[in-house]
Amino acid sequence: MPTLIAANVVVVAGKGGVGKTTVTAVIARAAADAGRRVLVVELDGKPLLATLVPGIEVRSIAASDALDEYLREKGFNRVAKRLATSGVIDVISTAAPGIDDIVVLGKIKQLERSGEWDLIVVDGPAAGHAITFLTSAKGMLDAVRGGPVYAQAKDVMELLGDPERCQVVLVTLPEATPVNEVIETTATLVDRVGVRLGPIVINEVDTRTAVPDPATMKLGRGADAKALRAAAVFRHARREMQDAEIARLRRLSTAPVIELVEIPVAGLAAKDIETLAASLAVDTA
């Protein structure tokens, strides 16, 4: 899996609902199974990741906690305590747009520089926020000319701009709207951030037995036959749409594309992540 874990930090991003948390878990599991020391970072406070990757350390980073820690590290202990107890620390980002993203990225940079892990996989924000999340440091550098915040933004930009230290993996589904969004996000991240783009992961690709053409199916008559024919029509159309969107993404994307197969279960579990990780390691070796 060299292209997915070619950097120290991998930020996984994608439109809400495309399965970026699943892909985060799969990358982490595949890397751990390959002998890497892996840390998973999640930013939304969701407990799901820890259940999907047992045996791998998972840390949650909240913007308010990262800002509190940043202030204390800079010697503003009294200010940090006062802000935390008053609740003001939760609204500082309104007065200084981007500061919450910068301190979170700064914490990730600090973890990367510690050398404790070979790979840090970040379950990043949805694609729309991913752009502001990753461009926050550049915006801050344009807005200020010195001070600790400037230094923090500069350090973050150095992390994002170094292809050996950081790359972004975008996740999509084989559907028109998510594919359109991932294409737009790819162009924006390259133009505005200069971050290295890893492969685009197409999640939930249906690789089950090919569906016969409903027009040629001989099912007889009756309610059951009608329901089977309707199901075949739906799956046949979905497979055609899927194949067309995968082909379009491969044609338009400058990044390599990796397909992650669909597992038709009600809810993913750790064993499903193991299965997907094994297939991913084989497919990208």
Image (cartoon, rainbow, N blue to C red):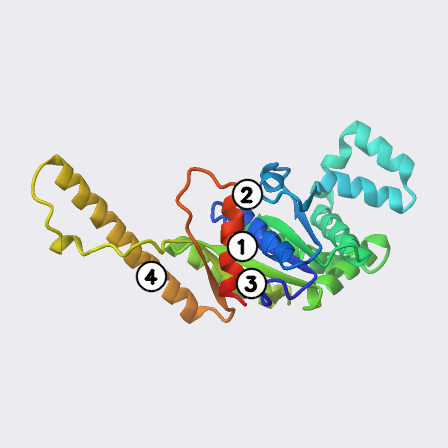
Q: Nearer the viewer, mark 2 or mark 4?
A: 2
Three-letter amino acid code at disc 3? Thr
Let me know if residue 98 appears in the view: yes
Estimate the x, y position of residue 136 in percent, counting from the top left.
68, 55
Give the Cα distance between marks 4 and 3. 25 Å
> Would residue 190 be found to the left or right of residue 78 on screen?
left
Q: Are marks 4 and 1 in contact (CB under 8 Å)?
A: no
Q: Earlier in the sequence, mark 1 or mark 2?
A: 2
> Is 212 on the left-hand or right-hand side of 103?
left
The residue to which callout 2 is attached is 270
Query: Mark 2 vs mark 3: which is more N-terminal?
Result: 3
**Tag 4–tag 3 contact (CB < 8 Å):** no
For the residue labelled by badge 2, is the local secondary structure a helix, a strand or a loop? Answer: helix
Whichever of labels 4 and 1 marks the residue nearer the N terminus, that label is 4
- Mark 2 touches mark 4? (CB < 8 Å): no
**Residue 3, position in %: x, y?**
58, 67
Inter-mark Cα distance, 2 to 4: 28 Å
Indicate the secondary structure of the residue bearing disc 4: helix
Q: Quadrant of residue 92?
A: top right
The residue beneath circle 3 is 188
The amino acid beneath tag 4 is Asp
Q: Are marks 2 and 3 in contact (CB under 8 Å)?
A: no
Q: CA distance from mark 2 to mark 3?
A: 34 Å
- Is residue 131 visible in the rendered image? The answer is no
- The residue beneath circle 4 is 243
Observer-side mark, 4 or 3, equals 4
Q: CA distance from mark 1 to mark 2?
A: 10 Å
Percent position (x, y) of residue 87?
76, 30
Disc 2 marks a residue whose amino acid type is: Ala
Residue identifier under label 1: 277
**Along the horizontal axis of the image, is 116 left or right of 74?**
left
